[in-house]
Image: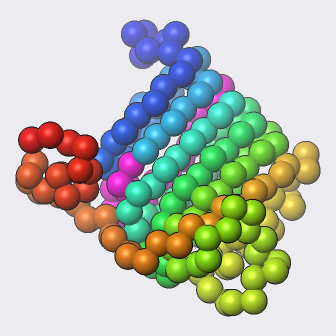
Amino acid sequence: MGSLGNLGVLELVMICVRPEDVEILGAIPSLLFLNITTAGGTNGRITVNGFRSLKYFSLIICRCGTALEFQVGSMPNLEHLKLAFPLHKSRCLNNGASSLGIQHLSAISKVEVDIHGNCMTDSNYDPTEDEKDGAVRGVARAINGAMMTLPNRATVRFKTTREWECQRFERVSFVRELAGIDNSINL
């Protein structure tokens, strides 16, 4: 870890976030700001632990089928969390924990959640005003509930964007298949 010991800001674009990736990144002692964009996680999961110094974390998940979970004790100094993920049905989060474990982020003061799915486009979505009993409303309410358990009255803002197609993330086996996941890759 000596060569990464002074790294404070990091932005990554990854096809798949693996548990060992989270472990390596979470062990960087000086990392304060982290942005990750990914198609999904190994076996449909991204489990976050570690990250002792992190203050800002942004995670953009581009494909359906990945559950995100923040573990107890992870990111103890995190102040600002920004998440974006597709959610057409509960299976888009791999039927994972709908609060995402946000209740474990004890120092959080601001959360921004951008949900793409079977919902109306709304730059300031309020799940308490949503009459439909869908996956977006369920996850937004669970996140709100988790936020209420935190001691420092953190703010949460939801943004929803209509996205018709549910594109599931699957493990790729050939380099040529990567072009279908990210059109910016030149093969």
Taking the spot 78% from the left edge, 65% from the top edge, the residue there is: 144
The spot of residue 186 in percent (x, y) is 14, 40
Instruction: Between residue 44 and residue 127, name the one nearer to us.
Output: 127
Percent position of residue 139, x then y: 65, 73
Q: Is residue 22 left or right of residue 129?
A: left
Quarter holding the C terminus?
top left
Question: Which quadrant is home to the N terminus?
Answer: top left
Q: Position of residue 122 (x, y in %)?
A: 68, 68
The reply to whether residue 84 is visible in this rendering is yes
The residue shown at (69%, 61%) is: 123
Q: Is residue 109 left or right of residue 121?
A: right
Q: Against 34, is 128 above or below? A: below
Residue 7 colored magenta? no
In this rendering, would 66 be left or right of 136?
left
Q: Residue 39 magenta-drawn?
A: yes
Foreground pick, 160 / 3: 160
Residue 52 seen by the camera: no
What residue lies at 40% left-to-right and 10% top-to-bottom? 3
Give the magenta part as a residue range.
Answer: 38-54
Number of marks drawn = 0
* Vertical comparison of 12 with 114: above or below: above
Q: Is residue 113 above or below residue 141?
A: above
